[in-house]
Image (tube, coloured by chain):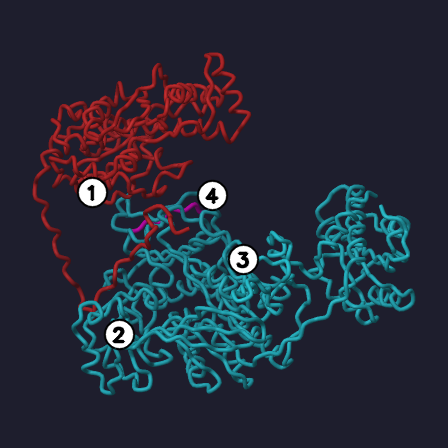
Amino acid sequence: MSNYIFYPGCSMEGSAKAYYDSLNAIKGSLGMNLQEIDDWNCCGATEYVGMNLVPAYSLIARNLALAANQAKGIDTVMAPCSACYLNLEKADYYMAERPTLGEKVNEALAAGGLHYDPGSIQIRHLLDVIINDIGLETVKSKVTNPLKGLRVAPYLGCMVPRPDYQHRWSDFEHPSELDDVLKALGAEVIDFPLKTNCCGGHMTQIGPETAYELIRRLVSSAEENKADIMVTVCPMCQMNLDAYQAETNRYFGTNFHMPIVFFTQLMALAFGKTPKEAGFGMELTSTKDALAQIGKDVPAPAAVKPGKKREGLPMPAPRLRKYAGGKVTSE
Amino acid sequence: MSENTPNKPKIGVYTCHCGTNISSMVDVENVRDWAKEHLGSEGVIVSRDYKFMCSSLGQELIEKDIKELGLERVVVAACSPHLHEKTFRGASERAGLNPYLTEMVSIREQVSWVHTDKVVATAKAKSLIAGTVERVAQNAPLEKLKVPINANTLVVGGGISGIQAALEVANAGFHVYLVEREPSIGGHMAQFDKTFPTLDCSACILTPRMVEAGSNPNITLLTWSEVVSVTGFVGAFNVTIKKKARFVNEELCTGCGICWEKCPKSVIDDVYEAGLGYRKAVYTPFAQAVPKYPVIDKPNCTFFQKGTCKACEKFCPTNAIDFNQKDEYLNVEVGNVILATGYDLFDAGRVTNYGYGRLPNVFTSMEFERMCNASGPTGGEITLRDGITKPQTVGIIHCVGSRDKNYNNYCSTICCMQSLKFAHLVKERTGADVYEFYIDMRTAAKSYDEFYQRVLDEGTLFVRGKVAEVTDAARQPHEKGKLIVQVEDTLIGKQRRIPVDMVLLSIGMEPRADAKETGKLFGISCSSDGWFMERHPKLDPISTMTEGIYIAGCATGPKDIPGSVSQGAAAAARVLDKILQKEVELEPIRASVNENKCSGCRICNNLCPFSAISFMPELGITRINPALCQGCGTCVAACPAGAISGTGFSNEQIFAQIDGILMGI
């Protein structure tokens, strides 16, 4: 069993309940023991840090202080929500980098009898924990219902791989972690070009036209790449793309139907859980057609008809050196 | 500190204004008077100042005092000894004083240039002068070492710079060993199609030089070879060269080419074809290779891997294939070494937002060179990766991996001109629209800017801005199926999305991946960027801090072809100068071991950056080769027994200097 202090964040109990349910369905198979932070509070989401730094970071750091107190030998606090993860990381980083801010935050925490020393606990995202602690081999070994035939667009969103203070991710622009997990489940993973683009965030509330355009780009690219379903790690991304897809269709006169679910939901399905246990049914854009693809044979790609005949062999495809697309290890 | 004793040598102190470089921050007159007054008890009998001590009048001042006042020590407070120590020691020598009894105090680099408070700066200058006055009293006269020079020269690297260096030395009548790691000499220049700005065919101007190098009786050409060890010192280096097994008998081979014609195994050629084309498992990299003999690529040869095939052997008309050939080790004696080991190309895959490796129609500049080349994989046709479709729009991105704090900070200098050349070639051969995405245009050499004008006139479109990404995710219908270049056009202050069919990445130059090890092998160091470090970046760009080791071409930093050729020739001139002097004078500042104190602990053995220290197992002690030692002092500091001392830096001298600095003003 790997032990983690667990910071669920507000979404997991509301809009992202499917994420919570599916995580609960698989955590046992993955050997994860999650200890929820006692009396945690909201991380401030994407809005609060833009208003006033000290109260914003005090709000976040309260969770870190509680987590560190509760840790007792556990070295990691894990957050499945990208905004929560980034906010915890930011607070930890800036409290160390800007000592005055750190002092002021601790002054505020002291009012509640708390204190947080930056760096005293590791802050990690669920996906990072699954890839690097649990490992892809373990994930593969738990698959009883491979997702063969399902074409998925891995959509990570912008908050997980950037700015990556602790160098945990393989790349800022095209990280491969989510692709790797989905491949381990047997799904057919497309090379999704917009995997780290923005979903619009809170623009759905303050400037919907901007958000619609960002949503349109993502959904249209997934559709163009013939994905059956999009998969994300972030409650905000899931909500924007799912709940505002109909609005987006209305706004642009389009007819997109691209379901989007959490990666843990597909993991739960692949591990043999029922769709209900995996949190399916709560999404607004139906996943029925997509899930019906599972198990179907993939037609082999049609052979490319050669045009003008060329002597010898065709040009080799570009190949990456060993560190491209992975952590730079040679330097 | 110490009272006036008659034993003090007679010392003269000379303080330089360096125009206003020093005098604007240090009260020079005050320093002059103070030295005379306060250091008189330390032996100072004369103290003078002068506007430019390094001028001939300034030097004459010192010479006159030595002769007339009988000075026994000279202290010059001026710039760094790196700049003018030689000058002032020369002046002393002319006046009959042993040059090592003259010392400099750096009150420019270490005082006036780095301080902002004149009072403090003046006090610091005095303190440093007092230290050097105490120290110089302890100096002993030293004699320079003379070492005979072996007239043979080693040139490492057979690119254009190395070829030039080898030819210059060989044509002067001296022998050269030219070592190249690939099967043929020629280097990167042999891969190019055209050269900027004249658009000469690269091979046409290079191959005559290659042939000359291959046939010159004074050049021993060692291709498919690497230097594995270097011992000795300037004038007498002993070099071991590994001649990798070619599996082809060079005496019998005629270079007819039947072996590679018959070889059934095709391999992607990552070196010469930059990954865009193929070669056989037995191959010469290109048709004009020098020497003409092929090599068998053992890891890819069917016979070596599976035990059967031997097609090359069966068909060879002269029985030149020899599967039993072994690596050979060659020992050569040389007096000087020129390192022209070149550069590696930046790995475009590291800039993931440009999509190289993911998007097939994103090419690197070297891939494109090969594509343009008539002997390249497409026979000189410019096509997309499918080998068929002609691009209608091409985007060329500058500074990929250069001028970027995420990768390399420096400018690779050649990419602007290379990109302009590409624009011209694309226009000429396909008529496609070409966009150049640049940060700044840097076309600063003879006829370069004229070429830029020409490409502008040809209608190439220039967008000033750093490209954010290259993507295949279309937002608008007209972007579908294209590569979209997302860029901020800084001249109009707008984000633009420009759909193109083909993207060329002008990738920068990087130091060779093994430059550090090569540097260690030859006892020279690399800068923080990883390029070989020059003795002086402006005034001695082809020498290193190790006597007898010279550097040329891109091994010292990014350069164009004329720059590389000039450096090759300059390094050769320096070597010839050394050879013609027949012997070389070495600075006597070096370390020596007191063999009575040495316990043979060997702590110092691996510390020496110049490989000057060796252990004498039969005596149980360590010795330092005086010709190899550069007097850096590392071993002196490391010796736990205090058995090593450095001439010019003895304990007495250092302690006296510290006393002087601390004596208070």
> Which quadrant would residue B567 be assigned to in this image?
bottom right
The quadrant of the rendering that contains the N terminus of chain B is top right
State which tag comes first along the sequence, 2 or 3.
2
Type of the residue with mark 4: Gly
The residue tagged with tag 4: helix, strand or loop? loop
Q: Chain of mark 3?
A: B
Cα separation between marks 2 and 4: 55 Å
Residue ID for mark 1: A189
Mark 3 is surrounded, within 10 Å at the Cα level, by few (under 14), some (14 to 19) or many (20 or more) other residues, namely some
Name the N-terminal-most of marks 3 and 4: 4
Between A174 and B428, the one nearer to me in the picture: A174
Q: Residues within 10 Å of mark 4 (few under 14, many from 20)?
A: few
Disc 1 to disc 4: CB gap under 8 Å: no
Task: Give the magenta range.
Answer: B483-489
Q: Foreground: B300 or A14?
A: B300
Tag 3 residue: B602
Q: Note the chain letter of the red one.
A: A
Residue B497 in the image: above or below residue B298? above
Give the amino acid at mark 1. Answer: Val
Question: Marks 3 and 4, Cα distance to the nearest angstrom?
Answer: 65 Å
Q: Position of residue A330 (x, y in %)?
A: 39, 52
Q: Amino acid at mark 3?
A: Arg
Chain represented in cyan: B
